[in-house]
Amino acid sequence: MEFSLSEEQEMLKTMARDFLENECPKTHVREMMEDEVGFSRDLWKKMADVGWLGLVFPEEYGGSGMNFRDLTILCEEMGRALLPGPFLQTVLLVGMPILTAGTEEQKKEYLPKIASGDMVCTLAVLEEDGDFWPDGVQLKATQRGNDYIINGTKLFVNNAKGVDYILVAARTRRATEPGDGITLFLVDMTEWGTYVSPLQTMDQTRPQFEVMFNHVAVPASNIIGELHEGWSVLKEAATKATAALCAEMVGGGEWVLETTVNYAKERIAFGVPIGSFQVIKHKCADMYSDLEYARSLTEWAAETIKDDIPDAQMSVSMAKSYCGDTYKMVCDHGVQIHGGIGFTWDHDMHLYFKRARSSDTAFGDSYYHRELLAQSID
Amino acid sequence: MTSQNLEALRREVRDWLRANLPKGWGTPEYVPPQRYSRESHELGKEWTKKMYDAGYTGFNYPKEYGGIERPREEIAVIYEEMARTGTPGGPLSLGLLVAAPAILVHGEEWQKKRFIPKILSGEESWCEGFSEPDAGSDLANVQTTAVRDGDEWVVNGQKVWTSMWEFADWGLLVAKTEPDAPRHRNLSYFLFDTTTPGFSRRPLRQMSGEAEFGEMFFDDMRVPHENMMDEQGRGWYVAMTALTAERSFGGTGFTGGAAAMGGLGTSDLLSANSLVELARNTKRYGKSVWEESAFRQRIMQTAIELEAMRWSGARLAARMMKGTPIGNEASLLKNFQAEMRQRRGDLTCEILGAYSQMVRGSTRAVDEGDHVYNMLRARGATIEMGTSEINRNIIAERILGLPR
């Protein structure tokens, strides 16, 4: 277990921050908020050029073979910059299942394309009930010759517009165990029969969509992993994505803390900086403290994934639960300490405030993860 | 150090603990001496001596002051094993955690040689005289005076909230020596023998019922000039060193301390498990408390917070190993630990319902009334060693740089 960053990791962090400050200023974020697709292919290509998209893939598939902890260093910076785009989705929720459960042919075909930035992806799991659990997967795929025909609707699909592929969790068999009978299909978005429409969501930095599949034919060769056994692949990928999301949340929280502390030093009220009032100091101290603990849990979770420790799921649940509560609290205080200006659309505080909320609900909120932990010792 | 050698050390420590812990330790048969009694104090001294002789304590101090030098990995193994069984400790911790660090930084050579070895070996126990009735959070407002008379200082005044007050052999004392000097430059720091004439002490009973703390009175008590630590007028700075040391250890606790050394103590996790067990075995309105979502959530939150603390300790340790000293971050751990203790105390009592009211002595008390004791005692946790408010000021001003 190594907590401090190596020299290479420090460099990666500095490089990522510089890159995002140049390429993803808030003007870009706000432009993307108004954009129909919601992310920039140009920026995506640049991210591929600096090696981010293939960071954790082995070299033989066009990646650079770095580890999961390295990836979370990037994610932290992405969360800080509010980078729009399906990075977690492409790399961890689609790329990782291909790497861990895909056939050699699939790996050779897709992973280099992901790494080079030519294949942008997202994941479609949630349906009407809005919960990340196997019972929620009702969308059907039925076999017809060498194809599977997909029918149904997915909700809460991040960045569905503008991606090349969607990995779809579909029900291929009814079984007593809900996790049994779910299959993962890699659906080419140029195929006939997919309809993408935006959901009007609070967090515009990470747009979500409703995707309708109307008799979409997917070749059996596009099944990722074994038929009927997709849920465990998905769960493993979600564990990784959740840990990466925690890193994003810590990064975003630190931006809010820094911005708020700076404001408290400069804003004058009653003739003195508001940061000299104890009520403000104590709120800032709480923001700092809880972020430190959120970071500890997040780094520990990243290490357990990197080292393939069997109870990584538990460490991730702990981190996600704590990060969800903390990021929300930090943003609450951030808005409050900024006062009127923090309540405006023009100030960036609300972008983080909303990102905190959407991140908390993603992959199960704090309550869900605490309950998951409780069930693990039931 | 190979992992094989470390495993051998682990077995050695385990065997040693089995042979040396008090009879029945860790089982219901073991009856601990009453808290804060002379017997408990003596047990602590004996235990420290045994550990010191075996080479299991006294780390982080140079050899010439009686320190025991061991590689970090070995220390981690030793702490882990100690944390696993738990050990008698208590009364000596103040010497180890507060007196020795302050003497090491601010003491003269003879003071280091005279005092530190006997602290490490458990031969001499210590108490500290900082707070006064009118100097709590505002510690610089100390009113106890020390007036120079030849080679001695004559001390008059009162100290309150003194831990280990009753049996300590030596005391740390902050007194005003320059009444006209500005704040923070008017205090000096002394080491005093508690058998000195003019010194007296009495218990200060707290809301949990016992007198863990005491009051100390100085009535023309004479302290030799050579017992002053650091320079005259620099007492405030010595006190700050001592308090920061106390907070960092108080915040991490023994297990946290082990984690901070890079080892992974398990007793914190066990303490979350003990909440689960209590909830499972407690029936309210006909069903197990563990089945109640509201309680499950809070118990798991406690487990998460314990883990957060454990890994924060490990992160600080990683920083220490890179050579960055830990100072103000101690406030962070201290507050978190204290506030968590309160939440845990409240939660335990709420699990127990009506039975949470029964204190020690009642035959119907659960766990001999320990739960309600812990809940009450935890109210002091956010007041002692710097109130939560003072620690938040420290975080805001010294870490975040907000204006004073």
Image (spheres, rainbow, N blue to C red):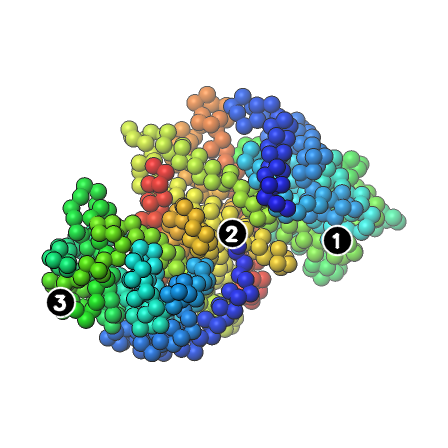
Q: Is residue A167 visible in this depiction of the protein?
A: yes
**Residue B303 falls in image quadrant:** top left
Q: Which residue is mark 3?
A: A193
The Cα–Cα distance between marks 2 and 3, rounded to whole angstroms, is 48 Å
Q: Is residue B129 visible in this depiction of the protein?
A: no
As helix, strand or loop, the secondary structure at mark 3 comes to loop
Q: Image point 57% across, 40% down: which residue?
A: B80
Dots 1 and 3 on the same chain: no
As helix, strand or loop, the secondary structure at mark 2 comes to loop
**Kind of residue at badge 3:** Gly
Contact check, label 2 and label 1, Cβ < 8 Å: no
Q: Which mark is residue A1?
A: 2
Contact check, label 1 and label 3, Cβ < 8 Å: no
**Kind of residue at badge 2:** Met
Q: Quadrant of the C terminus of chain B?
A: bottom right
Front: mark 1 or 3: 3
The Cα–Cα distance between marks 2 and 1, rounded to whole angstroms, is 35 Å
Q: Image point 38% across, 48% down: which residue?
A: A313
Q: What x and y, as percent, mark residue B111? A: 80, 47
**Above/below status of B36 relative to A331:** above
